[in-house]
């Protein structure tokens, strides 16, 4: 087994960074719908063209945030969009 020796201050810095990563992972796992995706991820997720995404924004079909030229969507808003356009079946599910 190979050992790696690092100074104590670097070790403490590493532990601090690991704690921050742990906190971020826990926060995301508690409420993933408060996460954001950018326009490229949205287009890929919805299987639409960038132009369609632009049209949806223009027609206020989906809420978004814009910082400079960058567009962001809340995952909760994406899920709400899908739920709003849900078509219910008249057939009872198999039992």
Image: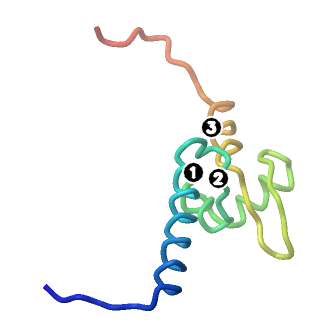
Q: Residue at x 33, y 91 (%)?
A: 5
Q: Are marks 2 and 1 in contact (CB under 8 Å)?
A: yes
Distance from label 2 to label 1 (Cα)?
Answer: 7 Å
- Residue 24 at x, y percent in the picture: 58, 58
In the picture, measured across the screen, residue 39 lies left or right of residue 93, that is right
Q: Residue at x 65, y 32 (%)?
A: 85
In the picture, measured across the screen, residue 92 lies left or right of residue 81, that is left
- Answer few, some or many: residues within 10 Å of disc 2's Cα (few below 14, many 20 plus, some between 14 and 19): some
Residue at the left extreme of this rendering: 1
Q: Residue at x 51, y 59 (%)?
A: 22
- For mark 2, what is the residue? 35
- Residue 94 at x, y percent in the picture: 30, 12
Q: Nearer the viewer, residue 8 or 59?
A: 8
Compared with 62, 21 (above or below) is: below
- For mark 1, what is the residue? 28
Quadrant in which residue 93 is drawn: top left
Mark nearer the viewer, 1 or 3: 1
Assign the C terminus to one quadrant of the image: top left
Compared with 59, 79 (above or below) is: above
- Answer few, some or many: residues within 10 Å of disc 1's Cα (few below 14, many 20 plus, some between 14 and 19): few
- Residue 33 at x, y percent in the picture: 63, 44
Assign the N terminus to one quadrant of the image: bottom left
Distance from label 1 to label 3 (Cα)?
Answer: 21 Å
Compared with 11, 87 (above or below) is: above
Q: Are marks 1 and 3 in contact (CB under 8 Å)?
A: no
């Amino acid at each position: 087994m190979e050992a790696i020796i690092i100074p104590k201050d670097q070790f403490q810095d590493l532990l601090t960074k690991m704690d921050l990563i742990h906190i971020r992972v826990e926060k995301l796992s508690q409420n993933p719908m408060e996460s954001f995706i950018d326009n490229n991820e949205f287009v890929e997720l919805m299987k639409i063209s960038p132009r369609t995404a632009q049209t949806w924004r223009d027609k206020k079909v989906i809420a978004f945030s814009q910082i400079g030229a960058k567009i962001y969507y809340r995952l909760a808003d994406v899920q709400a969009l899908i739920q709003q356009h849900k078509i219910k079946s008249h057939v009872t599910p198999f039992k």
